[in-house]
Image: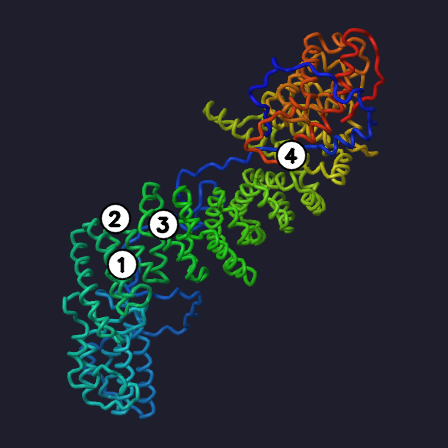
């Protein structure tokens, strides 16, 4: 805003004659109205306050989700929660249970004697069973680790200390103990085929692809296989190419040796390892793993952290991160055991290392949960400022499939959401491309939800975290360009459309738009998303009573319609747009009156007062911002003409002026007055403002009170209404009786040099008031007349009026300030000064043409 130099005071104001000689020709009422309408002002208001949630949870205390319908924020996590392998995500498909319930054969009693021998098997049947056996062993080779304890059929998974035996392993044990399928009963050819397949699967399993579990075949089974393999000759091409001596007489010992390491650590070489890789493992990695196992027994967290950092560095140097390490499963198994140490600092190191090994499935979920638990405490934020752990978090959202790992993404995003509440970490996340990553994630989810609603609910939980994080990012001024360049506003509109019934998502998106729409570039970009107008109206219809959502939506609409005439037209032409806004107006007006009459009943008086004040603030804030939308819409000629003829709209505005007081609700009263002022410019036949003119003028004492406001916009609105009041000569005395003249002159002195439009309105009001002037002192008052004779000549002197400090101000703003002074203030100020000078010492009437607003 342009300011006068401090060196200028009214003591140095020099007397000046009227600029331009004789006063200019008075303009007609139509010309004055058109000029005034062209200078209608938009209303400004503060952005709704967003309270900070004291507790870090996936869903805050104000969430609309019931606890039983949302993922938990608290859970237990231990080393046993992880899988020995990097398993694939569990399939959503479920097999239909069989109707047939097999009976468990009972052991023969002593009285029954020995079992009756079974007849020889048919060769065809032998071959069929043999092939089935081979297939079964092939499946078994992909199973889980055999537990130390086998679960009893009647025990449950929840029983403490119980580990369920995988079905594949149970099948192996049954096959090894079932006398009816004894290996000796098979023919030589059948044995050869089955054992070839079994041996190949067992040995190949020891060099599994990184991320799959290494199955430990029981020694008893291996020895049995080894002894049989010495009696058979496997002629398949696969066996010939196998580098392991599976058909040699000493196979059992070789297999055992391959399961031993030189340091008795339990790891083993993997098929495909080069001599260089084996050497690197034995000399660089294995010693660190041995130290980790040693330190784990003593739970020395500090030294464990150092060794984990050293292990990460060593794996990186050996190009063994990701899924490049042949013995990746051994690494992961060692790292998982360290989770039980319980150190947050160590857990961060483990998470970084495990994520660098590109785990997936349940293990990825558990690592994300681990970081989520740590991030719930603000004291741990400092742990995430080191070792590039933020890179690992952002990378999870980039390399994994969001819908295939939706629970892992949920906790990963929950972690990022918590950390984004820290300004240092927030800036770091922005620099790591988090806006771009989240917009791409939203796009993938939106595209998937367009195709099917299978993941609509679960993706909704995830999108709550995504939108809450984007809201935090929107606080950074440097993030706005990224929101614009990535198409974030469009994707957020799609999210709103797909989740219009989800109050949490809608509120978060509204908070993002509320923040961004305060900036011209983002507000313009949002206005160009034509789908947003109907979306915002839909939100107001569906969630009328959710005040924190409603207040933000009407604030956004107020920003969009403030400086963009196209946005005013777009909003107005939406179906039932005016009806929606007025219905909302009526609802919150009635709620405000009801709360005022019947305050909240609570046992504690202090609590009652606090809740009542909070409730008043929320409801009034909605009314303030809603009326602002109406005032801004009325600047458009088409919309303003329609609203000026809307009886319901004008009646609601008048009701606000009737029951509120300016000392308690200044901004609300100012917005209502400004709206009526804007609507009064439209001289339509069915004008509701004209029809209620008498009632409106009864409220003009309130307008005079508004002149005491310390804000220019409040005074501007009040002056606009008072100009119309002073056209009626019967209402003019009110202006002087309530100190209106003195307050108008105070506005001229306080705001004139910085706001020539407001100074012009003050002069127009005084011009209309002094129509029948015979003596300036009798008309305005002695002190008031002296002040006018001092101020007006000074303000009409270009050297004084435009002697401004332009340092730090835009050149266009300075030029606009000068144009307003020349075109709006000077003409009316010249006329007013001339009239006062002519009637200051003698009685001489001047031709009168009332100025209207």
- Mark 4 or mark 2, earlier in chain: 2
710 vs 506: above or below: above
Give whichever of 369, 318 is nearer the camera: 318
Which one is closest to the eye, mark 2 or mark 1?
1
Which one is closest to the eye, mark 1 or mark 4?
1
User: In the image, what residue occupies the spot 36% across and 44% down?
Assistant: 376
- Mark 2 or mark 1, earlier in chain: 1
Identify the secondary structure beneath mark 1. Answer: helix
Whether the residues at callouts 4 and 2 have beta carbons within 8 Å, the answer is no
User: Dot 2, crowdedness within 10 Å: few (<14), some or many (≥20)?
Assistant: some
Point out the image quarter for the N terminus.
top right
Q: Position of residue 605 (x, y in %)?
A: 47, 22
Identify the secondary structure beneath mark 2. Answer: loop
Q: Which mark is residue 312?
A: 1
Q: CA distance from mark 1 to mark 4?
A: 58 Å
Residue 621: name its quadrant. Answer: top right
Q: CA distance from mark 3 to mark 2?
A: 14 Å
Whether the residues at callouts 3 and 2 have beta carbons within 8 Å, the answer is no
User: Dot 1, crowdedness within 10 Å: few (<14), some or many (≥20)?
Assistant: many
Q: Which mark is residue 372?
A: 3
In this rendering, would 419 be left or right of 214? right
User: In the image, what residue occupies the spot 41% across and 72% down?
Assistant: 98
- Mark 3 or mark 4, earlier in chain: 3
Q: Which residue bears the numbered disc 4?
A: 628
């Amino acid at each position: 805003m342009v300011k006068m130099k401090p060196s200028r005071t009214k003591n140095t104001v020099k007397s000046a004659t009227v600029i331009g000689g004789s006063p200019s020709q008075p303009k007609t009422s139509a010309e004055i109205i058109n000029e005034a309408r062209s200078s209608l002002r938009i209303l400004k208001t503060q952005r709704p306050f967003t309270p900070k949630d004291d507790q870090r949870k996936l869903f805050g205390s104000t969430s609309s989700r019931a606890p039983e319908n949302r993922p938990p924020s608290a859970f237990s996590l231990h080393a046993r929660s992880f899988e020995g392998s990097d398993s694939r995500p569990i399939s959503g498909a479920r097999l239909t249970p069989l109707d047939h319930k097999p009976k468990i054969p009972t052991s023969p009693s002593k009285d029954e004697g020995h079992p009756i021998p079974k007849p020889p098997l048919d060769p065809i049947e032998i071959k069929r069973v043999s092939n089935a056996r081979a297939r079964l062993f092939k499946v078994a080779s992909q199973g889980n680790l055999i537990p130390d304890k086998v679960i009893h059929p009647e025990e449950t998974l929840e029983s403490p200390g119980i580990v369920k035996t995988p079905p594949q392993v149970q099948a192996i044990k049954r096959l090894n103990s079932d006398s009816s399928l004894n290996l000796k009963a098979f023919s030589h050819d059948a044995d050869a085929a089955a054992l070839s397949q079994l041996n190949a699967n067992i040995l190949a399993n020891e060099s599994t692809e990184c991320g799959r579990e290494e199955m430990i075949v029981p020694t008893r089974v291996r020895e049995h296989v080894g002894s049989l393999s010495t009696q058979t000759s496997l002629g398949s091409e696969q066996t010939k190419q196998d580098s392991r001596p599976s058909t040699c007489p000493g196979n059992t010992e070789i297999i055992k040796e391959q399961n031993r390491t030189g340091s008795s650590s339990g790891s083993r070489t993997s098929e495909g390892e080069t001599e260089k890789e084996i050497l690197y493992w034995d000399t660089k990695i294995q010693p660190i793993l041995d130290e980790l196992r040693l330190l784990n027994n003593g739970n020395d967290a500090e030294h464990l952290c150092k060794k984990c950092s050293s292990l990460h560095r060593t794996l990186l140097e050996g190009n063994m991160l990701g899924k490049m390490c042949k013995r990746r499963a051994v690494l992961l198994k060692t790292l998982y055991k360290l989770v039980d140490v319980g150190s947050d600092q160590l857990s961060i190191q483990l998470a970084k290392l495990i994520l660098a090994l590109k785990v997936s499935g349940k293990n990825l979920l558990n690592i994300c949960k681990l970081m989520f638990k740590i991030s719930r405490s603000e004291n741990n934020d400092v742990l995430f400022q080191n070792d590039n752990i933020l890179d690992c978090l952002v990378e999870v959202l980039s390399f994994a499939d969001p819908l295939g790992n939706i629970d892992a993404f949920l906790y990963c995003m929950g972690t990022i959401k918590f950390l984004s509440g820290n300004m240092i970490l927030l800036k770091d996340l922005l620099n790591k491309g988090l806006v771009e990553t989240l917009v791409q994630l939203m796009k993938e989810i939106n595209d998937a939800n367009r195709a099917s609603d299978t993941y609509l609910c679960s993706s909704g939980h995830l999108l709550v975290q995504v939108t809450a994080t984007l809201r935090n990012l929107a606080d950074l001024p440097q993030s706005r360009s990224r929101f614009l360049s990535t198409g974030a506003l469009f994707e957020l509109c799609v999210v709103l459309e797909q989740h219009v019934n989800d109050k949490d998502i809608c509120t978060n998106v509204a908070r993002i738009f509320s923040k961004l729409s305060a900036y011209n570039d983002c507000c313009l970009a949002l206005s160009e998303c034509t789908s947003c107008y109907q979306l915002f109206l839909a939100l107001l219809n569906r969630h009328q009573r959710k005040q924190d959502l409603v207040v933000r939506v009407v604030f956004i609409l107020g920003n969009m319609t403030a400086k963009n005439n196209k946005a005013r037209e777009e909003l107005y032409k939406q179906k039932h747009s005016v009806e929606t806004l007025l219905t909302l107006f009526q609802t919150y007006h009635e709620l405000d009156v009801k709360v005022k009459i019947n305050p909240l009943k609570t046992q504690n008086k202090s609590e009652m007062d606090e809740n009542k004040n909070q409730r008043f603030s929320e409801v009034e804030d909605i009314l303030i911002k809603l009326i602002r939308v109406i005032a801004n819409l009325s600047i458009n000629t088409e919309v303003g003409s329609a609203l000026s003829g809307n009886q319901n709209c004008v009646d609601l505005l008048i009701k606000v002026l009737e029951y509120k007081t300016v000392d308690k609700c200044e901004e609300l009263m100012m917005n209502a007055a400004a709206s009526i002022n804007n609507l009064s410019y439209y001289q339509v036949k069915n004008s509701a403002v004209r029809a209620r003119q008498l009632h409106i003028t009864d409220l003009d004492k309130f307008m005079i009170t508004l002149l005491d406001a310390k804000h220019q916009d409040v005074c501007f609105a009040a002056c606009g209404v008072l100009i119309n009041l002073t056209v009626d000569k019967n209402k003019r005395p009110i202006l002087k009786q309530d100190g209106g003249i003195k307050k108008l002159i105070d506005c001229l002195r306080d705001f004139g040099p910085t706001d020539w439009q407001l100074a012009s309105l003050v002069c127009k009001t005084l011009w209309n008031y002094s129509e029948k002037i015979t003596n300036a002192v009798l008309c305005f008052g002695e002190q008031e007349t002296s002040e006018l004779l001092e101020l007006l000549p000074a303000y009409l002197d270009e050297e004084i009026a435009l002697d401004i400090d332009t340092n730090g101000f835009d050149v266009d703003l300075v030029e606009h300030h000068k144009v307003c002074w020349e075109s709006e203030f000077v003409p009316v100020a010249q006329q007013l000064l001339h009239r006062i000078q002519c009637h200051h010492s003698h009685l001489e009437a001047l031709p009168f043409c009332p100025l209207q607003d």
